[in-house]
Image: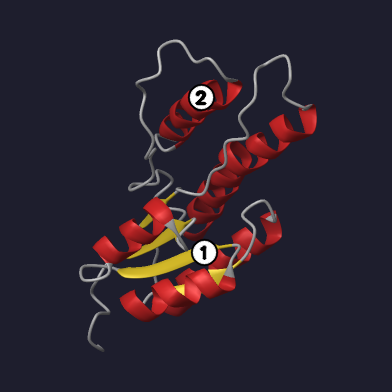
Amino acid sequence: MQAGEDKPVVIVTGGGSGIGAAVAERLANSHRVVICGRRRNALDAIAARTGADAVALDVTDHAAAREMVTHTVERHGRLDGLVLNAGIILSASIAELPIADWDRQIAVNLTAPFVMTQARAATSPGQSRCRGCGELGGRSANRPRHLGLLGRQSWNQSVHQMSRL
């Protein structure tokens, strides 16, 4: 067994910047980390600092997301968790938010985590529950003034409940 093969394997979506990059850096010593995101240069910079595998993709490309999960399992022999961090907030009042922006948020914030969780479950039939999935955002906005905050709360709850499947 090569060094590090006994470490858990985790995929971090949105791993090229912000919270995703910080999570990848934090997990780098104790896990084998695969980061994904849209910006290749940012991913490569984080990968150079952490030793993570970097995969440039848009999480709304379902075929590419499924392929990344399958490739991770083939390469590392397992996948122990997902950090479903990729997300967007296109903030506007509910009266002004274009439906295209709403659809994009749903695609990135809800459908993509579902696809990743489904792909992970398919690679480990005996483990239908995806441990390690969950929300990273807060739940403090009781009266959101913009749909973006309401969308963030909905996303947090949806990803949390999906992780319990």
Judged left or right of residue 40, residue 94 is: right
Disc 1 secondary structure class = strand
The residue depicted at 27 percent of the width and 79 percent of the height is 5
Q: Identity of the amino acid at label 1?
A: Cys
> Which scheme is used to colour this image of the protein?
secondary structure
Q: How many marks?
A: 2
In the rendering, at what x and y percent does residue 73 appear? 46, 70
Direction top: furthest residue: 143
Q: Give residue 107's quadrant in the image.
A: top right
Give the secondary structure at mark 2: helix
19 is higher (above) or lower (below) than 27: above
Circle 1: is it few (<14), some (14-19), or many (20+) Cα within 10 Å?
A: many
Quarter occupied by the N terminus: bottom left
Q: Which mark is residue 149?
A: 2
Q: Residue at x 58, y 66 (%)?
A: 39
Q: Please state which of residues 123 and 50 is positioned toward the viewer in this rendering.
A: 50
Residue 35 position in % (x across, y down): 45, 66
x then y, percent, for residue 104: 70, 39
Any part of residue 71 in sight? no
Q: Position of residue 25 (x, y in %)?
A: 29, 65
Residue drawn at the location 54% of the way across and 71% of the way down: 55
Image position of 29 (left or right of 88): left
Quick check: can you spot residue 131? yes
Kind of residue indicated by mark 2: Leu
Mark positioned earlier in the residue sequence (1 or 2)? 1
Tell me the quarter of the image containing the C terminus: top left
Distance between the alpha carbons at the discs numbered 1 and 2: 24 Å
Question: In the orientation shown, which residue stands out farthest toward the bottom?
Answer: 2
Which numbered circle lies on residue 36? Answer: 1
Q: Quadrant of residue 37?
A: bottom right
